[in-house]
Amino acid sequence: MPSNQPIVLLREVGGDRYLPIWIGPGEATAIAFAQQGMAPARPLTHDLFKDVLEAVGQELSEVRITDLRDGVFYAELVFASGVEVSARPSDAIALALRTGTPIYGSDTVLDDAGIAIPDEQEDEVEKFREFLDQISPEDFGTSNQ
């Protein structure tokens, strides 16, 4: 993006809306690693969290993007036990990608911040996806420590 701030673009299943969420470079790297199936030399925080969940026998059943207040998105991690934990959407998405957990956006959030892109504009979205496919975590200027 022109501001050099990474963005996650979530697509509505069965609809034509997209939910753009601006995120930090560290979370962008974590999400990009998960999308590309890359395993860093040392586990990132989200990898550690996934390993801890497995070690204690907890299953993440869903991620919910629940609210948008003053330009800030909010999310919840929902566990199979019924426990819900507040989280930043970027962290929740990074964890969901590692665990294969579905991500849901509330209707209110989609109504307020969703961007409708009709099928005839899908070509533009595809060009954006191709751009995203060509970037790597190194493009975000962070390093693994």
Image (tube, rainbow, N blue to C red):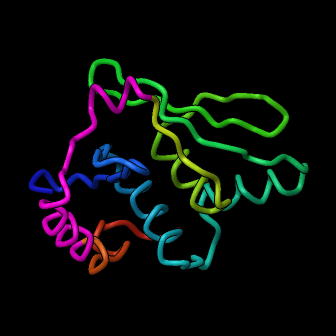
- Looking at the picture, tell me which residue is in the foreground, 134 or 62: 62
| Left/right of residue 24 with respect to residue 87 in the rendered view | left
| Left/right of residue 51 with respect to residue 139 in the rendered view | right
Judged by its main secondary structure, the magenta piece is: helix
- Looking at the picture, tell me which residue is in the foreground, 6 or 121: 121
| Left/right of residue 120 with respect to residue 96 in the rendered view | left
- Looking at the picture, tell me which residue is in the foreground, 49 or 18: 18
Q: Is residue 141 above or below residue 92?
A: below
Residue at position x 23%, y 52% from top?
5
Q: Residue furthest top?
A: 70
* Quarter placement of the N terminus: bottom left
Which residue range is magenta in the image?
A: 107-131
Residue at position x 57%, y 76% from top?
40
Q: Is residue 32 above or below residue 37?
A: above
Q: Is residue 48 above or below residue 138?
A: above
User: Residue 25: within the magenta?
Assistant: no
Instruction: Give coordinates of residue 32: x percent, y percent.
Output: 43, 68
Residue at position x 35%, y 47% from top?
15
Q: Is residue 15 above or below residue 42?
A: above
Instruction: Give coordinates of residue 2: x percent, y percent.
Output: 9, 55
Instruction: Give coordinates of residue 84: x percent, y percent.
Output: 70, 28
User: Residue 117: within the magenta?
Assistant: yes
Residue at position x 70%, y 52% from top?
49
| Left/right of residue 7 with respect to residue 124 in the rendered view | right
